[in-house]
Image (cartoon, coloured by chain):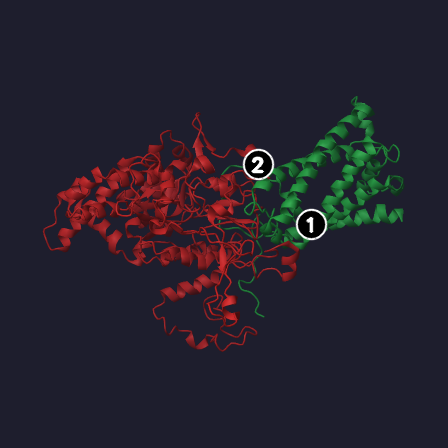
Amino acid sequence: MNVFLWVIVPYLCLAVFVVGHAWRYRYDKFGWTTRSSQLYEDRLLRLGSPLFHFGMLGVVGGHVIGLLVPRSWTAAVGIDDHLYHYAAVGGGLVAGVMALVGMCILIYRRRTVGPVFSATTVMDKVMYAFLAAAIVLGMWNTIAGSIFSLGGEYNYREGVSVWYRSFLAFQPDAELMAQAPIGFKLHALVAFALFALWPFTRLVHVFSAPLGYLTRPYIVYRSRDSRPGQPGSTPSRRGWDRVG
Amino acid sequence: MRVMAQMAMVMNLDKCIGCHTCSVTCKQAWTNRTGTEYVWFNNVETRPGLGYPRTYEDQDEWEGGWVRKPNGRLALRAGGRVKKLLSIFSNPKLPSIEDYYEPWTYDYETLLNSPQTDTFPVARPKSLISGKDMNVEWSANWDDDLGGSQEHAARDVMLKGIEDKVKLEFEQTFMFYLPRICEHCLNPSCAASCPSGAIYKRAEDGIVLVDQDRCRGWRMCVSGCPYKKVYFNHKTGKAEKCTFCYPRIEVGIPTVCSETCVGRLRYIGLMLYDADAVLEAAAVEDEHDLYEAQRGVFLDPRDPEVERAALAAGIEADWIEAAKKSPVLRLITDYKVALPLHPEYRTMPMVWYIPPLSPVVDVVKETGQDAEDRGNLFAAIDTLRIPVEYLANLFTAGDVEPVDGVLKKLAAMRSYMRDINLGREPDASIPAAVGMTEEEMYEMFRLLAIAKYADRYVIPPAHAEQAHALEELATDCAVDFDAAGSHYDQALLGEGAGYPTPVAVENFRMLQDRQTSDSLAAPDDKASRVNLLNWDGRGTPEGLFPPRDGTGGR
């Protein structure tokens, strides 16, 4: 069971994540967009969207530090567990609350504003469910686990993080996850399910974060002669639709 | 000097009767799809009026276009790259659907299904955004023909500074129509605002396009364009804009709006310009100098030096020949009667306008004076400051001098041509008074009044050796996305998912063949064509599609 949950499922999700993105990018460049609904409603979005997105950027940054940076490294630069704990919980709380509040505003908006709701796809709803579950479980782990120590002390840097690095190194150690508290287990499983869904939702827009804008010249010139294989060109197809 | 070619347009506003045929045919051709109901690549505004979207010209509010910084460099008015990225999650300057209008349809079904009643059943307006009943309160042309002008036209941004002088009472005001398409600017701020780099200027003909496969729906182009001519397709989540009908232009036929213009007021042709000089010209300090500065960027293809440089820059000889014959070049450079729309946005727009003389003529006529007499018209142009100042706010950043000059040329043409038409001796002093020769004036009259199709549209086709790349260009506006992707994808990944259906250039080739062939009724290949009325929709019988190689084989 442990092997199934902490080796097979994660790798399956990872495979779907990678292959799914490749497929989506090849098949559906046209659908690769943020699907913004700002045109329909502006007031709630203006508040909720930046809150959620900046919060999520903080959350992702926190996860990168927490999961990928080993305890020994931070110790080596003179950050002891106590200090690290305060920084992680403090930062995590701020970012998490931002993301959570932002998400609540956005979900409320999506449900109550008619045009926005009718523009919501099935995949959007599924994605929202998993995203919300992941965020709520994550907050639970932070508040219940790290602040009030419900269910005993647990240092994820000795458990979950080590397992995650072993997972990324393709030498997964399922035992480490088996010993983690239920909150962490659920959070990880929901997150992996979200990763598997990722390529088939609007979340793909994350990978279009336009950082190139900072360096490219303002005006883009392109030649009409765009050969297949060059960026932005599509393979030639029949110029008409099949009938019937 | 880096010579580039630009497909440009001039519209003669005196001839616009505000019939909206251009808007309607454009819409039928390009934007009659879900998600683009409110999108008008071409619209016709009554001026004075609010425009579309409402008060789009108020850049203090919308922050479109460029500004010149104190150090002499250009910056996007809405902020640079970092600010754009920081506000990417919620564009603070995006017009809402209310600033355009909420598109609607009518519930026609009740008319058909209604049981017999004492009163007529009513087809209620239904919002195309929410699907609910709605009150129609505004649309693309709510203030057409100065309708409700007391309330609306008074808020026209271009009346700033002259608002107390302009009388909006029906009898005392002036009015003209302003058809607008994308300006296909030399320095497009929409392209500069696009975080994804999806908006580009085509190197061959300067047409500004949105790559639908690269657009990620960040919406910065919508707010970046000061003319508000980039629209957000709310179904596909992508930006769309006027394409200058590039599939038609590529085969040498004019845009749909030009083709169908009943007033024949549009002119299409090439302009050659020095791409290296654009930024400097767009950054001149005084806004009043922008019109002259932009004219300074243009190159005269009749200059052998320019011709040599153009050839060296890879512009084909037939394009240079077409540039020499360009009606746009004559109107902008030779007669100097065309002016850019809002040069103060510093985007270097390339759809220019001949300002209308008719508001002035109308006033003279109403006084009972001879409205074709040069003296009367000149005096009227000098005294009727209000229409002239208003036109200057539109076309020269408020500088009345160039507008004066253009109107006097048009007035001179009127009185000069009257003598000719009445069989009198033409008066050489009339053209001389506006710095033109008699021959020039007559040529200008021919171009403005009676020019034939081939003189109004000088469009060199794209090159045959590039035809393959042209056929299914990746960057088309996905006209037929409804058909692309299965219903399964639509439900799962959202509207428009899947491969886009490319614009088939073949259709345009057929159109061109039909329009240019000698015989409309009996083309040579009539016998081998398929009668679509008899076709059962199965398979592709011989002759259903035109021959691929043009020789008859399939």
Residue B274 placement, left or right of B34: left
Seen at 40% across and 63% down, the residue is B512
Asked if B285 appears above or below B204 in the picture, the reply is above
Give the chain of mark 2: B
Amino acid type, mark 2: Ser
Q: Residues within 10 Å of mark 1 (few under 14, many from 20)?
A: many
Q: Position of residue A58 (x, y in %)?
A: 69, 34
Between A108 and A160, the one lying in front of the other is: A108
Instruction: Kindly indicate which chain is depicted in red in the rendered structure.
Output: B
* Front-most of residues B451 and B109: B109
Q: Position of residue B546 (x, y in %)?
A: 47, 68
Report the chain holding disc 1: A
Quarter of the image with the C terminus of chain A is: bottom right
The quarter holding residue B311 reads top left
SS for tag 1? Answer: helix
- Does residue B352 appear in this view? yes
Report the amino acid beneath label 1: Pro
Q: Which residue is mark 2?
A: B87
Label 2: how many residues lie within 10 Å, few (<14), some (14-19) or many (20+)?
some
What residue is at 55 percent from the left and 33 percent from the top?
A: B83
Judging from the image, what is the letter of the chain drawn in green?
Answer: A
Report the residue marked by disc 1: A199
Work out whether A103 lies above or below B236. above
Q: Secondary structure at mark 2?
A: loop
